[in-house]
Amino acid sequence: MDHVEGAFKATETLIKEGHENIAIITGNMKSRPSVDRLSGYKKALEHHGITVKEDNIFFGDYTYESAYEATKKILTAHDRPTAIFVLSNIMMLGCIKALIEEKLKVPDDISVIGFDKIDALNILGMNISFVNGPTEELGETAIDMLMDLLRGKNNGIVKRVTLSPQIVLKGSERYKGKGI
């Protein structure tokens, strides 16, 4: 999946809603997807003429706990962001826990958008917008490539395929003003 494109689209979605002060909670920066997603976030801000604030970049490690702690820090920032972009579904759970503890409502008080779907949040009535990897298309492409390899159709040529992610909007990206 094109992680740069996915992060760009997610950040741009928030910008188009009116957000200019957007925090990001990254994954482990030794991970290529994290590096690419952070790059996409920065590119979207720059593309729209918004200065990248290093104070809005919170480094997580793909754990629930790291995002919980990062969200707590975001919420106490002097110039608190109006939106948070969270780079994984597990970290989104930590972010949501911190928001609930602070009695903040999404998107009334703060907006969020994540990376990957979380069915459990839908069950709980929390409609969180997210970047959706093309899972079905990825599986079909992998099977096609494997079948070509088994049939000897690849002639020893390594094929690299990058699939475009989609943004699934569920309302959590909406801008309601400066928040509380």
Image (tube, grey):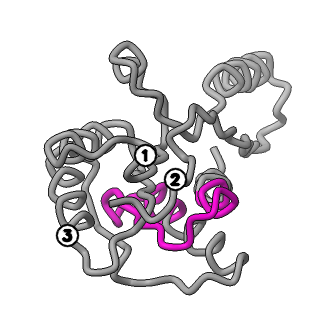
Magenta range: 11-37
* Residue drawn 28% across the image and 48% down it: 62
Q: Is residue 152 magenta?
A: no
Lateral position of residue 103 relative to residue 79, left or right: left
Q: Is residue 28 magenta?
A: yes
Q: How crowded is the residue under tag 2: few (<14 C-alpha within 10 Å), some, or many (20+)?
A: some
**Residue placed under numbered mark 1 in the picture:** 108
**x, y (%) of residue 2?**
65, 50
**Residue placed under numbered mark 2 in the picture:** 176
Q: Amino acid at mark 3?
A: Thr
In contact (CB < 8 Å): disc 2 and disc 3: no
* Residue drawn 63% across the image and 44% down it: 1
What is the secondary structure assignment of the residue under circle 2? loop
Q: CA distance from mark 2 to mark 1?
A: 6 Å
> In this view of the protein, which residue sits in the foreground, 26 or 103?
103
Give the quarter of the figure containing the C terminus.
Answer: bottom left
Q: How crowded is the residue under tag 1: few (<14 C-alpha within 10 Å), some, or many (20+)?
A: some
* Residue drawn 67% across the image and 54% down it: 9
**x, y (%) of residue 150?**
72, 18
Q: Which mark is residue 31?
A: none
Q: Is residue 41 above or below residue 127?
A: below
> In this view of the protein, which residue sits in the foreground, 153 or 49?
49
**Residue placed under numbered mark 3 in the picture:** 76
What is the secondary structure assignment of the residue under circle 1? loop
> In this view of the protein, which residue sits in the foreground, 140 or 159?
140
